[in-house]
Image: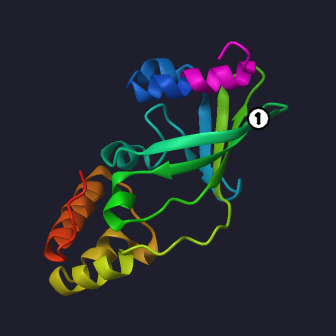
């Protein structure tokens, strides 16, 4: 880390504080109005908090982990390619696809925003269609509640329900449990 660019070091310190649950320290690296966007940096975005963006609780519950490569620093931005995996993906036997992550910094080195944009790779096959068919038969209406308009509602309550259903489906389908 000694040779890393100062913005990369700040980002690493911020992410390390978040990972260990030290949200007070992580918050010191965020501008008061920090935002997060998905796919395009358009509109107001969502608040970016020390505890995470809108998927913070979801990611913690499902043990999200990500890799980072091809780090680039330009002006007041840090950009890299990320691959994320989590227990939700593992339960569906889903392979992650790469995304470009960009952090924006102000002149004081505080994070003002984050953009998470998929790289347009076609998602490899997984077992979600099998799971949805099973859920529609055994728990009618539940998928529509958890995923209206085909978009996950990433609350902690919904994450717990997803996991409960996915574990039950895997058992009913004779699939090995995911540890």
Q: In the picture, which quadrant includes the N terminus?
A: top right
Q: Give the range drawn in magenta.
A: 1-13
Residue beneath the point at 45% across and 76% down: 149
Q: Is residue 8 one of those drawn in magenta?
A: yes
Q: Which residue lies furthest to the top in this view?
A: 2
Q: Residue at x 14, y 75 (%)?
A: 172
Instruction: Identify which residue is drawn at 35% across, 58% down.
Output: 90
The secondary structure making up most of the magenta span is helix
Q: Where is residue 78 in the image (x, y as percent from the top left)?
A: 73, 35
Label tally: 1
Where is residue 119 shown, x and y percent of the image?
Answer: 68, 61
Residue where numbered disc 1 is placed: 77
Q: Residue 132 falls in which quadrant of the image?
A: bottom left
Q: Is residue 62 visible?
A: yes
Q: Quadrant of residue 97?
A: bottom right
Indicate whether 23 appears above or below 172.
above
């Amino acid at each position: 880390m000694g040779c890393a660019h100062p913005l990369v070091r700040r980002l690493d310190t911020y992410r390390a504080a978040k990972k260990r649950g030290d949200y007070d320290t992580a918050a010191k690296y965020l501008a008061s109005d920090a935002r997060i966007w998905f796919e395009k940096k358009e509109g107001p975005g969502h608040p970016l908090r020390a505890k995470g963006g809108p998927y913070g609780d979801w990611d913690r519950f499902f043990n999200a982990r990500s890799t980072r490569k091809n780090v680039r620093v330009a002006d007041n931005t840090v950009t890299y390619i990320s691959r994320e995996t989590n227990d939700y993906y593992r339960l569906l036997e889903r392979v992650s696809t790469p995304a470009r992550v960009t952090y924006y910094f102000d002149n004081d080195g505080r994070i003002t925003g984050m953009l998470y944009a998929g790289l347009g790779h076609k998602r490899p096959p997984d077992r979600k269609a099998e799971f949805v068919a099973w859920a529609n038969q055994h728990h009618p209406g539940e998928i529509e509640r958890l995923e209206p308009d085909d978009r996950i509602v990433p609350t902690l309550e919904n994450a717990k329900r997803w996991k409960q259903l996915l574990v039950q489906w895997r058992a009913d389908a004779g699939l090995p449990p995911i540890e």
